[in-house]
Structures are given as structure tokens and as C-alpha cells.
Amino acid sequence: MIDPALPLGTNGDVVRRDNLSAILGRVHRSGGLSRSALTSATGLNRSTVGALVGELVERGLVTEGEPEPTRQRGRPSPQVLPNPGPVVIAINPELDAVTFALVGLGARVERRWRREVDHPIGPDETVAIIVETLRQLETELVARRILGIGVAVPGIVQADEGLVRWAPHLGWTDVPLAALITRETGIEAHVGNDASLGAVAEHLFGAGRGVDDLVYLNGGASGIGGGVIVAGRPLGGRSGYAGEFGHNRPGSSDPTDRLSTSGALEDEANRSRLLRAAGLTVADEPTLRAELTATASPTVRAELARQRRVLAAAIANAINVLNPAVVLLGGFLAT
Amino acid sequence: MIDPALPLGTNGDVVRRDNLSAILGRVHRSGGLSRSALTSATGLNRSTVGALVGELVERGLVTEGEPEPTRQRGRPSPQVLPNPGPVVIAINPELDAVTFALVGLGARVERRWRREVDHPIGPDETVAIIVETLRQLETELVARRILGIGVAVPGIVQADEGLVRWAPHLGWTDVPLAALITRETGIEAHVGNDASLGAVAEHLFGAGRGVDDLVYLNGGASGIGGGVIVAGRPLGGRSGYAGEFGHNRPGSSDPTDRLSTSGALEDEANRSRLLRAAGLTVADEPTLRAELTATASPTVRAELARQRRVLAAAIANAINVLNPAVVLLGGFLAT
DNA sequence: GGTGATTTGTTGACATGCCAAACATAAACG
DNA sequence: CGTTTATGTTTGGCATGTCAACAAATCACC
């Protein structure tokens, strides 16, 4: 009883789940691969892989297809493909709209749509929109198997509890979002920080594929969010609040780099400062980008250079502490 | 073959090793606990725990002792104690001395001694000192079972390869230290960064006991080292270089807080600045501490306050990113 | 086109490790 | 001193992965 969080013992069931998960995970991430590839990738026995794949087929999670024509000798190995049936629903509530996506195994985005909103919406209204949207899709969804709902929230989230602690952008505080959604829809729901989930996505399917230690910084309209992958797993911290790079105060060699009183990264380097410097009021990302690359204005270029310096200092700090293999920038930071 | 670092499959052997390790780890960390406590802590079956403990007894790693008198009903459960026989040798090479310790299971430090050196020593000389010291202890050690050697190096270390990449303090570069030691002594050797290992120690036995997410900062004579525990495991980063807080440049609200050109934490907050402010040239930790607490000099107090601010900014950054449950300070930082 | 080499799926025997249940043991309670 | 309770011990059973032998499917070579 000294340390309840210490690793527990392992028993047979755990092994099976582990191996099923290893197989399914690989199929999901690769979008389909041969059984023999699975055998060598997992280090398991041929017969074991056969049994595991069989179980996944039975459960309707994968299908086996024709072997890919290969120029190799030997008996061809059938492709193990993600079953197109089961889907999850991905939801991203933002200030101006709620975005939905229907995602199948293999990370295939089947559909994607937005529900615009003309005013900031609270949790209840968000859940109502979700319920309504699902109802509209009922005929389509009834034939499918819905595995779950995942919500990416711009704010501080306690993922294991499904709790939105604080989403300043949306004006939410202490919302048990996962529980609310599950109650109204009957579907298992999970909640996460948008930037953390972005980091996971980049790690599994994006630019950080195959890299087990990465830092992901995403510049949104209202701030800078971050996600960290450590040893292939998302960095959560004590209660899942990790990755708040935006509130960091990076040191810079030039005091004039500092414009805000706080000195926090997201106060120094942000989109609205760029817009202001460029003389724009509102602009989507491509427009802003074009303006910034085209301009010859020394003011704009200076502001760009300043933000780059601040950002670089913040990233340098992160690299010192986390030693990631790559640092990925998203949103306006990419610009 | 998409991602070789992904989790492999699990088979029977892994389960057994895992469970033996779970039991031994708990006994080691607690210094001894009852079999029934092990059962509930691991979640394994009574009979399984019995078998596992039996195997560990057979291997000479634990012993079973008299049950502790308890006021409970029921058959008393025997204590599972670390076997005092096997030991590891802990080594910490520093600028002025090499420190050795003989540590048994249960983290009992049996002996500890220093070999002073009057000049900076290279890797070969260090290994020679180790060999010589072991030879002196031969009569004592021959009866014991030496499980391994662990070296805590002040510098950047690639732990999995046993490689010291860069130890500026010692002047070492790219030293395959573990291999050298193993070659000369025939004993399995492991190498790690001193601050990282310090973090692990605090996590398992010290102030961070029972806490799975912590940051440990250690102020030494020549800089600031850091170690991070994430989800109960040391944070390594891509190649084990993580935790270099000392090179971070924290932002501060007051530009006058910045004295060095680099702005790096260990250039701003360090021991020699404190010594200089206090008007001392050399002092051990207690002396310095006494001087600092006793003094009323405004210069000294200002310097203390300044270092505190810089340190606080650095820690705040770390908290934002890592969300640890605790931050531990060691060395002069504690002062 | 046929034959052999090669790779991989399939099947059944086997080993291993954990669990569950029945029993044994040792303490506290009344 | 019997009952209750907690826990060690033993036995049998079950799940799971491995191994070896065999079958199937492809390529290479003649």
C-alpha cells in the first residue's frame, strides 16, 4: 500500500488484451498490412498472430483481404485491413463553430462538417448540438457501429475524468463533458486537450510518425497550445494538464523583444500582433501567410523576426528539458 | 516495419518477469512487507504471489521472516524481506573525488567512502581507481554477490548505451564508460546522469515518494542539473539527454534580474554568485547556508531575492509544460 | 511446363503461468 | 474452548503462447 500507482501484476487476460491491441493498433495506424508483417513486427508466433487476427475479424474490427502481389517467393500473406464498419465521432467545439468528423479505423476521415454558431455556446448547448447532429445522421449511423465519441477541447482538460477544467476560450469551467455526452447519447465519450490530441495525431499519422519523442506547438486564434509525446505516449503530468507552453515566459537576449507585461509566450507571439503589424483586421490563415511573405514593410518584418526570436527561445527551453527528436509547429506558428 | 519502437507482443515469459519484478521492486522500495500486502498491492492471486516469492527466495533475492505482530485476526502473513546478501556498487565521479557506496536491496547503504583526487581525472584513470578500490575490498566482497555497478555522472549521458556524451565538469567526451568498467571488472555496469538518477531516487525513496510526476533540480558546484519523472518513469527524451534545466533561459519581469550575457538559469542562479555576494571564497554547504540566513547585508539579500526570482520563473515554465505534482530542490538550491 | 526452394498459413500437441476452490493453519474474539 | 477471520498451501483447470509437422501458394530455374 506504499504506492498505489506502481505497476500492478500482470495476468493472462492482460497479455491477450495487450496483443490484440498491438495488432489492432498496427492495422489502424498503417491502414492495412500483411499478416507476416504483423508477425515480424510483434515478435509473436505465426500461429498466435493467426489466432489474434481471427479474433479481431470475429469482433468485426478488421477484415482479411487478398494478398498484395509481391515479387517474393513463398506463400502470399493475406492483407489485414481495418474494417470499414466501425466509426468514432470526433468533435471539436470552438468559438465560432462545432466541427464534427466521422472517422473509421485506419484513420480514414469519412465525413466532416461544421455547425456554425453565432454566439459563444455553453456546455449544455454544445451537448444539445451534438445530440441534434447525431439525430440528423441517424439513418446513416444506424447501420454503422459507433465505437465512441472523442472531443478535442481548447482548454485545460483532465482527460481520465472526462472533465473540462477551464476553457477560457469557450468560457467553460469545471464541466464534466464526457459524462454529459454519454448521458445524452448513450455513447462512450472521451475528452482531451486539443493540442495534446494534435500531438498524438502527428505522432501516429502526421509529421511525427515513427518519432517517439516530440513537442507539438499549435498556434490558434486565441493562444498557443502544446502537446508533448514522451516515449511514444502523451505527456499528461499529474492530472493531465501538461503542455501549457503558451504561458511560459521565455528569456530573450534582447529586452526590446518584450512587449507585453506578462512576457508569456502567447502574449508575445500571437496572431493578433501579426495581424496588427500587417494592418489587417481579420484574415484566414492563407491570406495572412500571403500578406506576410509578400510584404516588404520593415515593421512587419521586424515583428516577424521578433516573434521568431521569442518562439525560438521558448522552443530552446523545451528542447533542453525534454530532448525531443522533433518539434512540430502548427497553426499560425507554421506561418 | 512502420514503427519499430512500437510495443511488441507479450508472451508468457514476459508476464513472469514482470510479476517477479513487481514483487521484488516493492520489497526493495519498501524495505520489507508482508505477503498479504504484496497480494493486494499487485492484485495477483495468493497462490501466485506465494510462487513468485518462492522463486525470489530460491534466487537469493529475498528472505521470508517472522510475521510482524499485528492486532488482526487471521493467520499472520510472513514478512518478505530484502536479502541482505546481494549488493550493487554505486559510483559518483566528481571533480575532486570519486565517491563509492555499497548498497543492498531495500536501498540500505552499507558503506560509503571517498577517494580524493588532486587533479581532474580522465575516464581511464577513473576506471583504474574503480578497479583498485574493488581489489581492496576483495576480501569483503568475495562473500557477497555483486549484482552490478551503477555510475552517476555529472554530464550528458546516453544511458541505454552506457555512453558519457559530454561531461564538461570532468572534461570527458564520448566515453563508453559502462563498457570500460565491465571490461575491467567483469561486472555489469550502468551509467546515468546524476540529476536524473537523483530524481529517480527521490521518487522511490525520498521526498517524492509515491508521487508519479515530479521535477527535481539539483544545484551543484558547477551548474544546475535536472531530472524529471513522468508517469513514474524517468524522462529520457530522444537519447536520454532530457532534463537540462540549467541551460534554460527563463523570462523574468524585471530586466535587471539579468546579469549574465547568456541569461541561462545556471549562469544567473549559481553558487559562486552567492559566495561572491556573501564575500566568501570557498565554503561548504552548511557554512554558506548559515552565512546567508544570518546576514543582514542588503546586497546579499538582494542577490538571494534575485536568484529566487530567476529560479521561480524557470520552475514556473517547467510546471506549465510538465504539470508535475511536486518540484524538489537539491544542493545549494535548497539553501 | 515441371520441379524444387521458399515463405507462410494451419493444425494439434505441449509447456507455462495464473486462477479458483478446497483445505490447513494461526491468530483474535467471546 | 469453539467460532470467526485472514492467510498460506495444494490441486486441478483454463487460457495463451510456442513448437513442430504439414499443407498451400508462389517464384526460380531448367
Image (cartoon, coloured by chain):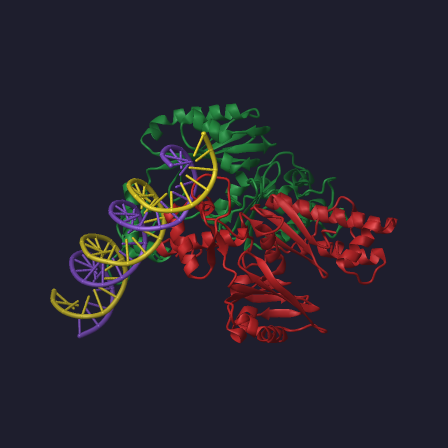
Chain colours: A green, B red, C yellow, D purple
The residue furthest right is: B297
Q: Is B132 rendered above or below residue A49?
A: below
| Residue B239 picture location, percent across and down | 54, 59
Where is residue C4 drawn, in percent x and y? 18, 70
Front-most of B331 and B5? Answer: B331
Picture coordinates of residue A304, whole percent (x, y):
67, 47
Q: Nearer the viewer, residue A210 or B73?
A: B73
Total labels drawn: 0
Left or right: residue D25 versus residue B31 is left
Looking at the rendering, in which quadrant would you find the N terminus of chain B? bottom left
| Quarter-of-image position of residue B106 | bottom right
Rendered location of residue A135, percent (x, y): 39, 24
Q: Judge whether A264 appears above or below B100 on screen.
A: above
Say left or right for B160 vs B48: right
Q: Examine the rendering and report whether any part of residue A235 can be seen.
A: yes
The answer, for residue A69, to whether it is visible in the render is: no
Q: Quadrant of residue A275?
A: top right
Q: Which residue is pictured at 78% across the width and 53% down the height?
A: B289
Taking the image as shown, residue A53 lies to the left or right of residue B311, namely: left
Which residue is depicted at the point 44% across and 56% down? B5
